[in-house]
Image: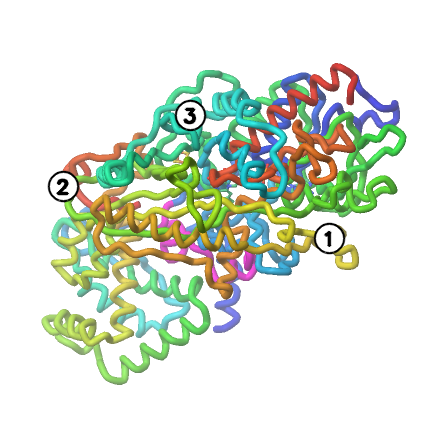
Amino acid sequence: MYFNSKGDEEVTYDAIVVGSGISGGWAAKELAEKGLKTIVLERGRKVEHIVDYTTASMEKWDFKGNTERPTQEQLKDYEVQARSGYTVNQGHSHWFVKDTEHPFVEVKPFNWMRGYHLGGRSITWGRQSYRLSEMDFEANAKDGTAVDWPIRYADMKPWYDYVETHIGVSGQNEGLAQLPDGKYLPPMEMNCVEQKFKKGVAGNFGGRMVTMGRTAHLTGQLSHNKTSKRGQCQFRNRCMRGCPYGAYFSSLSSTLPVAEQTGNLTIVCNSIVAGVIYDPETNKAKGVRVIDALTKETREVYAKIIFLNASAIATASILLNSKSERFPNGLGNDSGELGHNIMDHHLGVGARGEFEGFQDKYYKGRRPNGVYVPRFRNIDNASMRKDYIRGFGYQGGASREGWYKVVKEMKLGKELMESLQTPGYWTMGIMGFGECLPDHRNKMFLDEDNLDPFGMPMIHIDAEWQENELIMRNDMATSAAEMLEAAGAKNVSTYETINNNDKKNRAMGIGIHEMGTARMGRDPKTSVLNKYNQIHACQNVYITDGAAMTSAGCQNPSLTYMALTARAADHAVSELKKMNL
Amino acid sequence: MMMNRRDVLKTAGLVLGYTLTAGTAAAVLGGCSADATPGWSPSFLTADQAKVINGMAEVIIPGTDKMPGAKDVNIAKFIDETYMYYKTPEQQQSLNDDFKAFAEEHDFGAMKDGEKMAFIKSELEKGSKFVKTVYEQSVTGFCTSEKGSKEVLVFDPIPGSQKGCIPLEEVGGIWAI
Ligand SMILES: Cc1cc2nc3c(=O)[nH]c(=O)nc-3n(C[C@H](O)[C@H](O)[C@H](O)COP(=O)(O)OP(=O)(O)OC[C@H]3O[C@@H](n4cnc5c(N)ncnc54)[C@H](O)[C@@H]3O)c2cc1C
Ligand code: SF4
């Protein structure tokens, strides 16, 4: 079809997709479905859906000492990855890189949490899926921060509809301007205390909303039958180990199988893309340089279009490492913004409390989801704050104390046996997810004199929470406590884990939503990508992972990466057809 | 000894677990069971320490005529593994020190059955670090064991559906997981 020249046939495709995670899987699906011969180059090992979810059905007692928590021996390999406190354990540490094998330099503490394997972090993600709103796309322009998004909600709406319909998102439409409705499967259920909280918050804060978390799980039938790999959620809440029912969205359950069925897809694992090859004659990219992760040999792969979906930091590092006469500071870096404006979401701040009553009530099913309090600050005149801009949402939930209560009660003997028959009191906690502003000072860069074990210049990350984030956090703690108290909670306490420089494990990156390193914008002088996610000055390279984000919103971002990807793929294929690329 | 421990540590990352030897149903119902883990010997603890721990655990979690107790799950094995694989050298040292201090003052094995409960209670109230550790670890080990999870708590590995708010009696106990 689109071969460049005879000799290069076996390494020449219509499209290259770099990375097979949440956004790469989407690029592969869309491009292959639209008829392009597509190769996915994935840095990590091959993973087979279900077969390789080796820990999926293990119970606590199947692990030494009845716990899946990481052994001391394991922790030695996962210094950064383990900082979250929940990502590294025997149930799923194999989905995270060993920091000892994949080092980077923390100029300031930065929690770069990632997994190199087919499917990327689509296997381990928390599946919370929220749309950005018009408010979010307008925000930079309105408050004069960084640069304006080149798109608005209307550009994205059909693509949010499209990706939600394919992946299946469970949730409740609420008609909020700050959190647009979507195409949802039935919502999961709130428990009794969460319902009480919802009423209390609405009643005491002028209708402030508490809704069910929107999450990429099948709680009903998908409206399409494109992949046979999806089943209904069984409420085991062991998703991070990989789901044997294919009940949540991952590249392996949802996008890659559809791409494969087209017959247009080639996946090559253990392929580290080191750089993009720029062709000065055509002013386009002609392919990528690949390092074999096992043999360290290098080779080249060519295509008409290239989608970079290696995740924000890795994608920016590939571009920074793609130097040419035309682009001496890295491909697409005319603006000097490449690698800058790293954002994340700041969390680890909120409140918890105890609820009396409901002693005769309980719940069933380990709901892999919580409740969500959509943003309520700086959304209209009445909610404007003087001390900070933008806002935050909360995720949380209520539960009854389990067996551990007997330890607190210091029960012994017969009394202990009796106490083990009834769950304890109800507690509820909510944690804020706050917006982080794009800030040129927050950056990453490469050090060419210092190579990583694969011969790539070492990635350096130099970023930290800035003033607006830190100020917002006071309100995030106070508002959480106020809401719990108003809803009737007792013994309410707040927690704050960031405003303390010693705490490496709460440094930027801890939201695992790193983004913004190759932002979209209207002006090539101040941004890397145009409104279709093309590099301004090298238009057959598309970047649709978190690197593209111009601002962060406070919503979990991956759904937006998916929608941006599907939209960009549609654009790329129509441009190809028009012979514009 | 040191070499041995290191070798075991090397294999700790393997996800293959072990299976507890289940006592026969008759033994459980009869309130007595054979050794829960025949042939087991501790790696971190000494045999004597394991015996003291199991002795205390059996008082803390006696079981009932219908439910298993500590004697059915080998709490010492749980604590042995916990300290072997998950605790830092400092934490390991501290348990050994606490154990030593405790053993210098008390001979738990020599106490009469009738005295043991009152002893543990008073030690907990006094804030004895060693007894508190054994207490917490025993409850944790028991409630996370297969028998504790399935026969004392309510275990439902594949719920299949989710209900937010139901009468407690529909569950009839504490969810194990
Ligand atoms: C524990 C956890 C919870 C999360 N919860 C949520 C949530 O609830 N909601 C939400 O929206 N987001 C969540 N996230 C974030 C989400 O996982 C990421 O935003 C998302 O996966 C990013 O998609 P991506 O395609 O950019 O990258 P990834 O999914 O990370 O995939 C990148 C892929 O590229 C490969 N790669 C990297 N470098 C190269 C290279 N040089 N050459 C070739 N391949 C390369 C990697 O191996 C990987 O497979 C969570 C993440 C984690 C870890
Ligand atoms: S809770 Fe649902 S999605 Fe998660 S592992 Fe269980 S069945 Fe799969």
- Residue at the spot 46% in from the left edge and 72% down from the top edge: B89
Point out which mark residue A446 bears. Answer: 1
- Depicted A75 relative to depicted A524: above or below: below
Residue labelled with disc 3: A181
A554, A454: nearer the viewer:
A554
Does dot 2 land on a helix, a strand or a loop?
A: loop
Q: Per the image, is A79 magenta? A: yes
Mark 3 Cα within 10 Å, few/some/many (few <14, many 20+)? some
How far is disc 3 from disc 1 in space, using C-alphas? 41 Å
Residue labelled with disc 2: A360
Residue type for callout 2: Asp
Q: Residue furthest left?
A: B114
- Residue at the spot 36% in from the left edge and 31% down from the top edge: A234
Highlighted range, magenta: A59-80
Sequence-wise, which precedes: disc 1 or disc 2? 2
Q: Nearer the viewer, mark 1 or mark 2?
A: 1
Q: Chain of mark 1?
A: A
Residue type for callout 1: Leu
Q: Nearer the viewer, mark 3 or mark 2?
A: 3
Q: Is residue B137 left or right of residue A380?
A: left
Q: Position of residue A143 (x, y in %)?
A: 54, 41
